């Protein structure tokens, strides 16, 4: 934690506060890199040493308004454990947020961070019968490593959780058909890495398909890419450190 960070609020442990700061930074990064959808979508992080608790954004804030102290802490059963100071209950939680995220966090104990987006490009690819094509090196990062989940309406019903987690399985990325993307990470850095490159892969695919006939890589090259990317133990640490430096230069108010 930087010497310039605000004083940690009473009642929040040091480890939780550090996770709050990092999660707030992730919200700001998703805004900066154009992966937001007004006040919708959601990112969660598991609270250190509290496996039943996750941090989640208030429903109504734009991502560039999220700060460390503005995040709710909720139990995996959906109960609010901690409300931000001064919270009047006016914003509350997006129902889809806790239905999707509590399901994934409960099923996947390795998922520290869960991130959901539906940008123009990812929503377009999610509606393609072919799914994500290996037309770019960015897409190769997910070759054989992406799940698919069929659309069953907005995810606001607890009955939808079972199929969601079954389809995700052990993957760290999933395409929600006719909807968008869901990724998770063993760290916040890895979650950012996964969503950034998967969103980029979707943009490239949309552009390439609009440009004409596609050139597809050989099976041998795909297997080589799969093997190379598979050697990375935890992804995104260098990239995330660079993004954090940029955020601190531009606007460090997420730390408040």
Image (cartoon, helix red, strand yellow):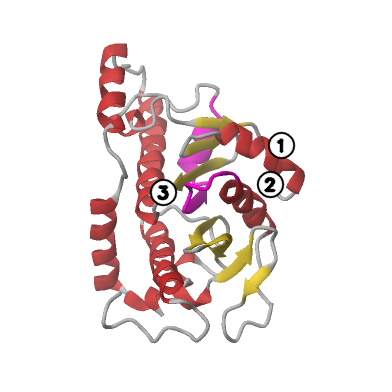
Q: Residue at x 43, y 29 (%)?
A: 145
> Does the magenta portion include 119?
yes
Outermost residue toward the top in this view: 219
Quadrant of the snapshot with the N terminus: bottom left
Q: Residue at x 23, y 59 (%)?
A: 242
Residue 240 on image: x %, y % = 29, 56
Quadrant of the snapshot with the C terminus: bottom left
**Could you give the CA–CA distance between mark 2 and mark 1, rounded to whole angstroms?**
8 Å
220 versus 2 height, above or below: above
Q: Is residue 59 visible?
A: no
**Which numbered tag is attached to residue 186?**
3
Q: Quadrant of residue 61?
A: bottom right
Mark 3 lies on a secondary structure that is: loop
Tell me which segment is drawn in magenta: 107-128
The answer to whether mark 2 and mark 1 are in CB contact below 8 A is yes
Identify the residue position indicated by label 2 in the image.
Answer: 155
């Amino acid at each position: 934690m930087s010497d310039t960070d605000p004083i940690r609020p009473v009642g929040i442990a040091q480890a939780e506060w550090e996770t709050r700061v990092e999660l707030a930074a992730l919200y700001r990064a998703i805004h900066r890199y154009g992966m937001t959808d007004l006040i919708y979508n959601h990112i969660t992080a598991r609270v250190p040493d509290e496996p039943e608790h996750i941090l989640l954004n208030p429903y109504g804030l734009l991502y560039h308004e999220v700060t460390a102290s503005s995040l709710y802490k909720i139990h995996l059963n959906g109960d609010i454990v901690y409300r931000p100071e001064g919270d009047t209950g006016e914003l509350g939680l997006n129902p889809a947020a806790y239905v999707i995220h509590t399901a994934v966090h409960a099923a996947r104990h390795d998922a520290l961070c869960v991130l959901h987006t539906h940008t123009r490009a990812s929503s377009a690819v999610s509606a393609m019968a072919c799914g994500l094509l290996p037309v770019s090196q960015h897409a190769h990062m997910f070759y054989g490593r992406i799940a698919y989940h069929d659309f069953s309406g907005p995810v606001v019903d607890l009955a939808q959780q079972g199929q969601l987690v079954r389809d995700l399985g052990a993957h760290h990325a999933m395409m929600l058909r006719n909807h968008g993307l869901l990724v998770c990470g063993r760290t916040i850095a890895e979650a950012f890495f996964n969503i950034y490159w998967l969103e980029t892969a979707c943009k490239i695919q949309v552009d390439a398909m609009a440009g004409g006939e596609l050139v597809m890589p050989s099976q041998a090259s795909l297997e080589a890419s799969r093997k190379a990317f598979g050697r990375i133990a935890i992804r995104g640490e260098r990239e995330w450190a660079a993004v954090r430096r940029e955020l601190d230069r531009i606007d460090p108010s997420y730390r408040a």
